[in-house]
Amino acid sequence: MRENAETIDAAAAQWVIRIDRRLTESERAALEEWLGADPRRVGALARAQAGWVYMDRAQVYRAAGELRESRTARRWRMAIPWASAAAVLVAVATALWAWQGYSRTHFATARGEIRKLNLEDGTRVTLDTLSRLSVRYGSATRLVSLEAGEALFEVAKDAGRPFIVQAGNVRVRAVGTAFVVDRRSDASVDVIVTHGTVDVWREASSPEPAVRVDAHKRLVTTPVQAAQPAELTAAQLAGAVAWENGVIDLNGRTIQEAAAEFNRYNARTIVIRDPALGSQTVVGQFQTTDPVAFVTAAAAMLDARVRTDGDRLILESGPTAQK
């Protein structure tokens, strides 16, 4: 009978502990034999070793030593120390196993990070900056919870198991399609379909009919209602998913909106205090990680100036740049 992933991960966690205390020749041979018997074990061992790096091993072994030196246990010096150490190591192995399971179903991105994932069914997910999601697959449903941020889903076809994304009280159902769900705000959830068709509905106190959203359309939902889908031009659709490739599309946005978008990706923030300046619209595309290029271009376009103050790029009225 073929081993399942959980059994492999548990064994990998035990091997990491042995490796850390140095393998004997016989153990090294046993490890090589174990790895060679199933290609999945190589990846499991790598994941376990990565998790082990983040754990405080010194603290673990120090705790085991303290148990050995416990006054109440001194008369059992030959028996209790090994039992205590073994208990600690088992606890560490259990923690590693739990961490590995969590890391396979929970994903997040840091500021400025764009992460591409391959889920177990072949679905591809691209997570935007400052995003979090979790995955729960069952025999009848593939359920993904977008807890914050934005994600592009390219769904693998499986008619027997609908793919459902939940974002707050909004649900998006698809079978073999590609779409974006944006939950950057508690006030609304945006759904943009690039290929195929999805059904969108809200989980409310009274049943609501699902809204069908076809390719090249956008649907915006609020806590109280879902608007009708709006058609997107080819340029609007391309701009809506440009972030997948690390690009911010600013066509039609105000300076203030553009600054807020750059600030999502960068620790170096753009500040615009003048409402009149902030309301001006801009055009163009910029790398998400290059706020300096944007404020420099905006200053030239609007006859403004850029002043730096620590990690802040301050865009002000006036043609002369100051430091």
Image: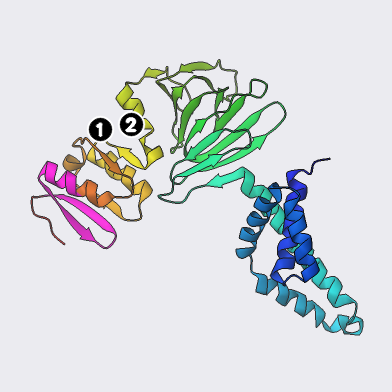
Q: Is residue 307 magenta?
A: yes
- Of the two numbered discs 2 and 1 on the same chain, state the one appearing first in sequence: 2
Residue found at the far left of this picture? 319
Q: How many residues crowd mark 1 within 10 Å: few (<14), some (14–19), many (20+)?
A: some
Please report the residue visible at 32 percent of the width from the left and 26 percent of the height from the top: 236
Q: Which residue is mark 2?
A: 239
Q: Mark 2–mark 1 contact, CB under 8 Å?
A: yes
Residue 251, disc: 1
Residue 94 appears in the figure = no
Please report the residue visible at 35 percent of the width from the left and 21 percent of the height from the top: 232
Residue 302 falls in image quadrant: top left
Label 2 amino acid? Answer: Gly
- Residue extent of the magenta highlight: 296-317
Dot 2: element: helix
Question: Does 225 sit left or right of 161 as displayed?
Answer: left
Quadrant where the N terminus sits is top right
- Give how far across and how far down residue 30 sits, in percent: 79, 61
- Give how far across and how far down residue 201 sits, in percent: 54, 22
Residue 208 appears in the figure = yes
